[in-house]
């Protein structure tokens, strides 16, 4: 419960930044070449405050690493299935990818649609996602998202 409270507080803080400036705080000036790329599939369900879940693959230095995504959203309504992909930058090493991300974005899905989502974690890792979704969802949202590598049965990371 403490994790959900922390993630919700971070999401609200980011959402307040979005609303105060009147425009989406995109890191468009960041032209750093990506250190990795990722693809993720998952879903959302929300009635004002909601839940985000999914699984994905990070490709870093030519090697694929599986991960799981979970979190909360604020300013969100509806439920969707989401497919997303994008570049990952500011990773000094693989372990920087795991962590708690603040995510922000906006969009609408009626049947099918998409949006841009930006995520940044405590290590400074920046993810720029382009999403495709199906379902019914309206959001101008801040999200708290936790990303963790999946472990193989042997106990090592994938």
Image (cartoon, rainbow, N blue to C red):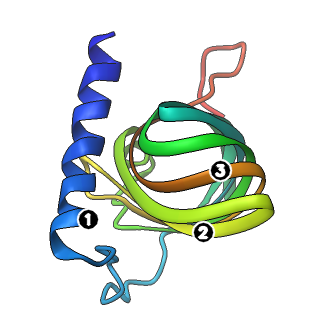
Depth check, front residue: 55 or 82: 82
Residue 137 has which mark?
Answer: 3
Residue 44 drawn at (x, y percent): 64, 38
Label 1: which secondary element? helix
In this figure, which residue is indicated by the disc labeled 2? 115
At x 35%, y 21%, the residue is: 4
Inspect this view and state whether residue 132 appears: yes
Asked whether disc 2 touches disc 1, contact meaning CB atoms under 8 Å apart, the reply is no
The numbered mark, 1 or 3, whose residue comes first in the sequence reads 1
Left or right: residue 28 versus residue 48 is left
Residue 129 visible, this orientation:
no
- On-image quarter of the N terminus: top left
For discs 2 and 3, the disc positioned in front in the rendered view = 3
Instruction: Tell me the tag on residue 117.
Output: none
Mark toward the start of the polypeptide (2 vs 3) = 2
Q: CA distance from mark 2 to mark 3?
A: 11 Å
Name the outermost residue toward the top. Answer: 1
Q: Residues within 10 Å of mark 3 (few under 14, many from 20)?
A: many
Kindly identify which residue carries mark 1: 18
Residue 54 coordinates in the image, percent (x, y):
67, 36
């Amino acid at each position: 419960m403490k994790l959900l409270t922390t993630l919700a507080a971070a999401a609200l803080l980011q959402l307040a930044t979005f609303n105060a400036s009147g425009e989406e705080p995109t890191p468009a000036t960041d032209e750093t070449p990506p250190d990795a790329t990722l693809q993720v599939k998952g879903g959302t369900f929300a009635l004002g405050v909601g839940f985000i879940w999914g699984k994905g693959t990070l490709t870093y230095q030519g090697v694929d690493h599986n991960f799981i995504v979970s979190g909360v959203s604020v300013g969100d309504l509806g439920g969707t299935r989401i497919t997303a992909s994008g570049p990952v930058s500011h990773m000094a090493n693989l372990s920087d990818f795991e962590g708690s991300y603040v995510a922000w974005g906006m969009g609408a899905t009626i049947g099918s649609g998409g949006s841009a989502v930006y995520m940044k974690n405590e290590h400074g890792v920046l993810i720029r996602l382009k999403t495709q979704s199906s379902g019914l969802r309206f959001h101008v949202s801040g999200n708290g998202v936790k990303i963790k590598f999946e472990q193989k049965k042997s106990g090592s990371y994938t």
